[in-house]
């Protein structure tokens, strides 16, 4: 039972780190186009560590450190969705001519 719990904890940690990496890498793409995805991994771990350390220092729940990454992940996807919907309207207007 303890081994399965340990394996689940490690898998959860890997999912959290991957989530943070996917949230950070779109912001690194314009500045570093060749290494943005590889650099997103250490940057996301550093940010996660700093945010969770300060939350722990303030006696707040450390799980709140995932909220900024969720906001980072939601902002570009919303922006891309807006752009794609505008492109779709433009295409439908152009096809009517």
Image (cartoon, grey):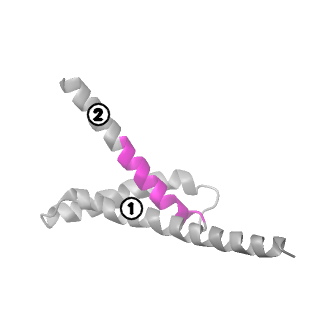
Task: Residue at 61% x, 67% y: name it.
Answer: 30
Q: Which mark is residue 19?
A: none
Give x and y (percent) for residue 28. Answer: 54, 64
Mark 2 falls on what kind of element?
Answer: helix
Tell me the residue that label 2 is attached to. 8
Q: Along the polypeptide, which appears first: circle 2 or circle 1?
A: 2
Q: Compared to 72, does 41 lie above or below?
A: above
Q: Classify residue 89 as left or right of residue 40.
A: right
Magenta region: 14-29
Give x and y (percent) for residue 19. Answer: 42, 51
Q: Quadrant of the N terminus?
A: top left
Task: Residue at 28% x, 63% y: name it.
Answer: 51
Give x and y (percent) for residue 47. Answer: 36, 61
Give x and y (percent) for residue 64. Answer: 25, 61
Comparing 50 with 88, the one in front is 88
Q: Which mark is residue 70?
A: 1
Q: Quadrant of residue 82?
A: bottom right
Mark 1 falls on what kind of element?
Answer: helix
Q: Classify residue 31 as left or right of residue 91.
A: left
Residue 15: within the magenta?
Answer: yes
Q: Compared to 2, does 17 lie above or below?
A: below
């Amino acid at each position: 039972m303890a081994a399965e719990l340990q394996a689940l904890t490690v898998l959860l940690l890997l999912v959290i780190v991957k989530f943070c990496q996917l949230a950070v890498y779109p912001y690194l793409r314009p500045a570093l186009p060749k290494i943005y995805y590889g650099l997103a991994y250490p940057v996301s771990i550093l940010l996660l560590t700093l945010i969770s350390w300060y939350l722990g220092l303030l006696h707040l729940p450390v799980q709140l450190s995932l909220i900024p990454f969720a906001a980072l992940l939601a902002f570009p996807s919303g922006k891309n969705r807006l752009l794609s919907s505008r492109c779709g309207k433009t295409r439908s207007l152009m096809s009517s001519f």
